[in-house]
């Protein structure tokens, strides 16, 4: 199991919570929010897509009558940069068990024009109200113990393409998916890792939105390098995660026409499948 942080942060009082916090533009009236996107969650110069999804997820949790994301579908329109941003939400429908809303994040270009960065459509509910019945053929990924896995800090030098976000994560990669870091990619589109937040904060549904897009891209193990920008990402949150580290498994089966899919599963410390996702990403061949 991963080593605990010396002083563990709690949900609501961690860097992740502070950096995803929004301010209502009109106090007491949900709908429009301001935020300063932190440079601490960047991949090279662009803000990480999972962090952005968590920002929009937090805005919708405030705007909708239900607090937990069940399904979130995002289209990434332009690359986001650290700095001021505006999130606008709209309530599409409210029901007894599910509410649906949409949200968009905007920034300004050099000429002061508003540019939409990401647009989300999501349905929210109450994860604690779901029945306990589980019927599945899915199995947790087999990953070596964390002390036999490797993170950015274990390399003799920073891994090419690494960035500020790695300092905010507890990320330990399965050695069998690390051939790319040694100059010998396996050719298999697989990536597996232990995942957590560096300050020891336990996972919650919003952290799951980050987890599905926090590992190195599977394209690295396919022998490709460079930025792999997300075009579309859909996340299904299946349960509230138990305290402790998560295991994340990502697989790509098809790269064609300069695009690939990444299918992710996130498992909690109680061996439950707590989130699934699929994204379409562009690769530079």
Image (spheres, grey):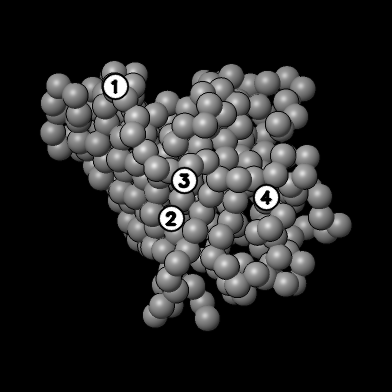
Q: Are marks 2 and 1 in contact (CB under 8 Å)?
A: no
Instruction: Identify the residue under disc 2.
Output: 263
Q: Are marks 3 and 2 in contact (CB under 8 Å)?
A: yes
Residue name at image x 57 percent, y 29 percent: 269
Instruction: Identify the residue under disc 4.
Output: 173
The earlier-in-sequence mark between 3 and 1 is 1
Task: Assign the N terminus to one quadrant of the image.
Answer: top right
The reply to whether residue 30 is in sight is no
Left or right: where 112 falls relative to 269: left
Q: In the figure, 159 relative to 95: above or below?
A: below
* Local crowd size for mark 1, using a 10 Å CA cut-off: few (<14), some (14–19), many (≥20): few
C-alpha span from label 3 to label 4: 15 Å
C-alpha span from label 1 to label 4: 33 Å
C-alpha span from label 3 to label 1: 21 Å
Q: Are marks 1 and 4 in contact (CB under 8 Å)?
A: no
Q: In the figure, 280 relative to 57: above or below?
A: below
Instruction: Identify the residue under disc 1.
Output: 131
Quarter of the rendering containing residue 55: top left
Q: In the figure, 199 relative to 266: above or below?
A: above
* Local crowd size for mark 4, using a 10 Å CA cut-off: few (<14), some (14–19), many (≥20): many
Provide the secondary structure element on which disc 4 rests: strand
Q: In the figure, 233 relative to 72: above or below?
A: below
Provide the secondary structure element on which disc 2 rests: strand
Residue name at image x 65 percent, y 59 percent: 177
Residue 217, given in percent of the width and then of the height, sits at: 56, 60
The earlier-in-sequence mark between 2 and 1 is 1
Q: In this rendering, which labeled residue sits more in front, label 1 or label 4?
A: 1
Q: Which mark is residue 265?
A: 3
The earlier-in-sequence mark between 1 and 4 is 1
């Amino acid at each position: 199991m991963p080593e605990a942080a010396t002083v563990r942060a709690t949900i609501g009082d961690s860097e992740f919570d502070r950096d995803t916090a929004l301010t209502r533009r009109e106090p007491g009236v949900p709908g429009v929010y301001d935020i300063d996107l932190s440079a601490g969650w960047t991949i090279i110069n662009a803000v990480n897509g999972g962090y952005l999804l968590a920002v929009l997820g937090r805005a919708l949790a405030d705007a909708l009558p239900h607090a937990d994301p069940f399904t979130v579908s995002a289209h990434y329109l332009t690359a986001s940069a650290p700095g001021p941003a505006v999130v606008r939400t709209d309530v599409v429908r409210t029901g007894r068990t599910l509410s649906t809303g949409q949200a968009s994040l905007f920034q300004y270009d050099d000429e002061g024009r508003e540019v939409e960065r990401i647009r989300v459509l999501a349905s929210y509910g109450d994860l604690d109200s779901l029945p306990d019945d589980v019927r599945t053929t899915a199995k947790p990924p087999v990953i070596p113990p964390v002390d036999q896995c490797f993170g950015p800090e274990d390399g003799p030098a920073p891994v090419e393409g690494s960035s500020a976000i790695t300092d905010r994560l507890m990320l330990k990669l399965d050695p069998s998916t690390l051939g790319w870091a040694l100059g010998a990619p396996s050719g298999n589109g697989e990536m597996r890792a232990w995942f957590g937040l560096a300050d020891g904060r336990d996972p919650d549904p919003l952290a799951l939105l980050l987890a599905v897009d926090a590992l190195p891209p599977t394209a690295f193990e396919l022998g490709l390098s460079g930025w792999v920008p997300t075009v579309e990402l859909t996340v299904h949150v299946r349960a509230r995660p138990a305290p402790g580290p998560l295991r994340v498994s990502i697989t790509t089966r098809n790269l064609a026409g300069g695009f690939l899919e990444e299918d992710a599963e996130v498992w909690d410390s109680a061996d439950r499948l707590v989130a699934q996702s699929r994204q379409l990403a562009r690769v530079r061949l």
